[in-house]
Every structure is written in structure tokens, then in C-alpha cells.
Image (cartoon, rainbow, N blue to C red):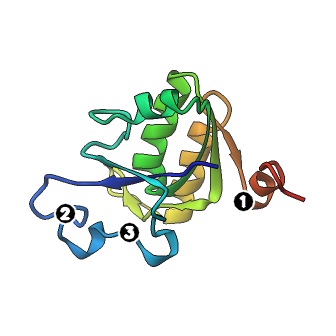
Amino acid sequence: MPVVHLRHDSAAPGSTYRPGQPGSAFKSEVMPRPDETITAKKTNSAFIGTGLDAHLRDQKINELIITGVTTNNSVEAIVRMAGDLIFETHVVSDATVTFDKTDLSGRLWIADEVHSLSLANMAGEYANVLPTEEVLEHLPGSV
């Protein structure tokens, strides 16, 4: 199956995801292989200002399996847009991650709560939300 890696190239001076900062590099666990596509993005959605939509359409890809960082930001943004663009979209619930978040009233929400709510936001209208085990069961060539 084709794999597209999305890299956030932030323009914000202090951002961890600014090119050249240690946080901007791919982690060894998800290092792109030579035959895999890398798409750089500057906004929360990889469909904005990139050739991602055209690339997927050119490759006749209409089904997406989404993993990544940050569940309630980049993951949710791309999933919502993918749904709006009529891609069949699946989010791997245990292959996305987020961080603690303080709301506008000052309440701290722990990462697990933020993650769960974000997955609930995506489930149904925008995507199928499934754990890795269920996704793997449905991949071509799976046993």
C-alpha cells in the first residue's frame, strides 16, 4: 500500500516543528522509506497549500488510514477535510497521540481525555475510528 508521510514545517520562530529544530525530524519508528512520499505542510491540514489532494487523486487513492500527532489538531484537521473531500477515512485510535490541554476557563484536561474527545469528534461523519488490530485485519494480504 502506498504511504504518505506528512511533515509540519512551521514558520513560527519558536516552534518545535520549525525546520532544523530537533522536533521537526521524523522519529526513527516512522522514518520514511525511499519509495514513500513526503508532503510538507505549513498549516494544521495537509490538504492546504500542498499537492496532497492531487497526488492522492492521481494515484486513484480514495481510502485513507490516518495516524499521527496531534490528535486534536493536525489529525483532526486532515480527517475533517478528507471527509469533506469524500475520501473514505479511517483513524487508528491507538496510533495517534495528543497532549494535556488547558481550556479557556483554566481547567486542565489530561491527554487521554483530549484524545478521547477528539476521536469522538471524528467518529461517524468524518471517519471510522478503529484500533490498530481492527485496521490490520482489513488490510489486503492480512490473515
Q: Which mark is residue 49?
A: none
At 50% across and 22% down in the image, what residue appears?
85
Quickly name the residue at label 1. Answer: 132
Amino acid type, residue under disc 1 in the picture: Thr
Residue occupying the point 60% across, 61% down: 95
Please give the residue where the numbered disc 2 appears in the rendered image: 19
Left/right placement of residue 68 relative to residue 61 reads left
Give residue 143's quadrant in the image. Answer: bottom right
Dot 3 crowding, Cα within 10 Å, few <14, some 14–19, many 20+: few
Image point 43% across, 30% down: which residue?
53
Residue 45, image x and y in percent?
Answer: 37, 39
- Taking the image as shown, residue 139 lies to the left or right of residue 38, namely right
Q: Is residue 119 above or below residue 121?
A: below
Q: Amino acid at mark 2?
A: Pro
Image marks 3 and 1: residues in contact by CB distance under 8 Å = no
Marks 2 and 1, how far apart at CA = 30 Å
Q: Position of residue 118 (x, y in %)?
A: 53, 46
Residue 113: horizontal and vertical position, in percent?
Answer: 55, 58
Q: In the orientation shown, which residue stands out farthest toward the front?
A: 35
Q: Earlier in the sequence, mark 2 or mark 1?
A: 2
- How many other residues sit within 10 Å of disc 2, few (<14), some (14-19) or many (≥20)? some
Residue furthest to the left? 13
Q: Secondary structure at mark 3?
A: loop
Q: Which residue is mark 3?
A: 26
Amino acid bearing label 3: Phe
Disc 2 + disc 1, Cβ < 8 Å:
no
